[in-house]
Image: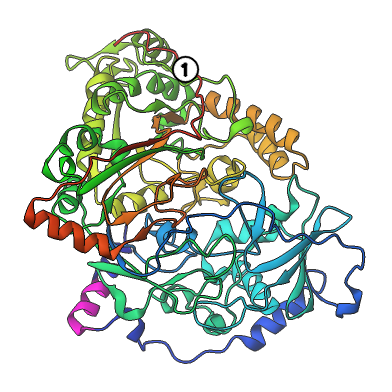
Amino acid sequence: MKSLPVLFLLILALLQSGCSPASDDRFPPYDNAAEAAAFYGSKPEFFRTFPLTDLPADLKWENGMDLPEIGSEAAIKGGSIRWFMASFPPCLRPYGPDANSSFRSEHHDDIYLTQTNLHPNFPGQHIPGVCDRWALGPDRKTVYFHIDPSARFTTGNPITTADFFMTFYIQLSPYTQDPYGQNYFSTKFAGIDKYDDLTFAVRLPEPRPDSVYFSQIPPMDHLFYKEFGPDYIQRYQWRKDPSAGAYTILPENVKIGRSITLTRVRDWWAKDRKYYKNRFNVDSIQFEVIQNPEKAFEAFLAGRLDFYHTYLDRQPWNWNEKLDGEAYQNGWIERAQFYNDYPRPSQGLYLNCSKPLLSDVRVRRGLQHSMNMQRVIDVELKGEMDRMRTNNDGFGRFTHPTLQPPVFSRELATAAFAGAGFTERGPDGILKNPATGQRLSFELGIRSRPQEQRYALRLKEEALKCGVELRIESLDPSAQFKKVLQKQHEIALAGWVHIPPYPKYWEGFHTDNAYEKEKNPDGSRKVKTNTNNISETSNPELDVLIDQHEKAQTLDDLEKLGHRIEEMIAAEASFVPAWATPWHRTVYWRWVRWPADFNVRASENPAQAHVHWVNEDMRRETREAMTTGKTFPVQDLNFDQYRAKTPASPANTEN
């Protein structure tokens, strides 16, 4: 929280000076070539170099070119899209403090390429990324790669083995102030071998269920990052990192506090490649800051935005009620609902176990039974959502098949609270401990969005029936996110985006991400900030299972261990599953076009795979129709080819 004023002062100074972030000349020239070389030399078993003649001759190379194309041959290149973001990101860095903001997916995760990528319609099947072929070594833990000679960063610099060495140099450095990255790259890899500028191998500590997948790392342009050093956080705060992807952010297109525009790379190296030629079609995508989603929806209806999908799963009133107007009835606006097959965001209430009252599992269990999530779904969400069952729904066989969420029950809640000593109700209806006078009162942190306010008020009203007081704190999304990462919350309504193909537990539930190894001066455990373990879950038995899951060598082991881990997470009662959607919805002006099957199977939202395009002729035709009164057929589309069956959740014992 203390860093926010500094950020705001920097933003204000930039605005007043009329400078773009990239014009900041506070940092002197720096070249890390010697330091990086010394680092590689200090770890001779990790960073190795061999002549190309030492490359194993009997490798079975794969190229992944036998799968169907992605997108539509009818796609048109060009045009622009106007979209929105709820808050301006605190930085453009992909790593380090504040990097994991809500805008990260749009400018990084959905765009960058690693050695290979997973085909979004064929789970677990690899397609070329920056590499045109790859091979699994006979030990099943060494994966060999050959870089496509045409592969380029958005800077235009060619991608070489040096850029994968640079990735390890940066990720293993304390300069990033990124505990997750340092742990991941230091424990999940045994090393990297260079054979020539285009040929290298990644070594894993042990065989994995899909070693090709687990050997993926993003190349980092060693020329762009030659200034990487102790001031990385500040120096690269607003510099868009290069990737092999189709879009970049030009310095002049960062309007601090107002908008950011992604620009399609001119002559992108993969523009004619299979799996990419019919994607990333739009020349520019402008994200305007509109903090209130309702205001954003109004901006869409007014024609300021070209499509709208964010929050439609949590705004059924917009889908069911507000769309029934002239623009929709006249066919100028269309809508589509697409059933996806994708891991669901872990939406729910995270209970901070480091807080004294919440350190008691009996209190946490009582809170679980006091949160009437089904009532929120039925009333606020019009019954259109599924109740989440675990923290990792949507992973197929890796999601627990029978585990169910806690039901709302005054009887079960009262019994759990009584076990913790809360047996008397005060005149306000709140349970208290007669021995200490302590009340069951908790702060519930939410983002300052109208729909979240409604959810929180409904939960507050229902929790009162169980003798619990929820004090709602509504903060700007960035401020709320920072508070949660600092572990200053008691209860937070939050969610993490998950990506296929396997659940990950270390980030969110391992003690390594809850507490520092050293203790406070008074001997108490020191909370570890800026990690994904926002529930501060810490259980040695759970840690052992998570460590085993991290090293699992077969899919069966991943499945069995994952199911046991989910059972232990449920027993910890540090997470209250909320709701999930089995589909994504979008409304769009008819000049935004989509493939005949609309989207890809593994898509979290309709824009993620970039299979849409803009038809500028239809834009002109539609705008002319809006002045002449011409109409088109109403388009209310539903795509359920990937619809999955979700086990039914038990009904609440009471309402």
Image location of residue 110, percent across then percent down: 47, 58
Q: Position of residue 373 (x, y in %)?
A: 34, 24
Dominant SS type (magenta)? helix
The image position of residue 552, as x and y in percent, is: 75, 41
Q: Is residue 542 magenta?
A: no
Residue lying at 26% horizontally and 84% vertically, measured from the top left: 19
Residue tagged 1: 648
Judge from the rendering whether residue 652 lies leftward or rightward of residue 449; answer left or right.
right
Residue 13 in magenta? yes
Q: Is residue 391 above or below residue 217?
A: above
Q: Quadrant of residue 21?
A: bottom left
Q: Who's the residue at 29% across and 81% down the image? A: 20
Q: Amino acid at mark 1?
A: Ala
How many neighbours does mark 1 have within 10 angstroms: few (below 14), some (14-19), or many (20 or more)? few
Q: Is residue 398 above or below residue 552?
A: above
Q: Is residue 439 visible in this depiction of the protein?
A: no
Left/right placement of residue 182 relative to residue 345 reads right
Q: Is residue 251 left or right of residue 115?
A: left
Q: Pick whichever, 185 or 312, lies toward us.
A: 312
Q: Residue furthest bottom?
A: 29
Q: Residue at x 55, y 75 (%)?
A: 269
Query: Where does the image place residue 308, in percent across and percent down from the top left?
Result: 27, 49
Please give the range of residues in magenta: 9-18
x 86%, y 78%: residue: 52
Q: State the residue in front, 75 or 404.
A: 75
Q: Quadrant of the C terminus?
A: top left
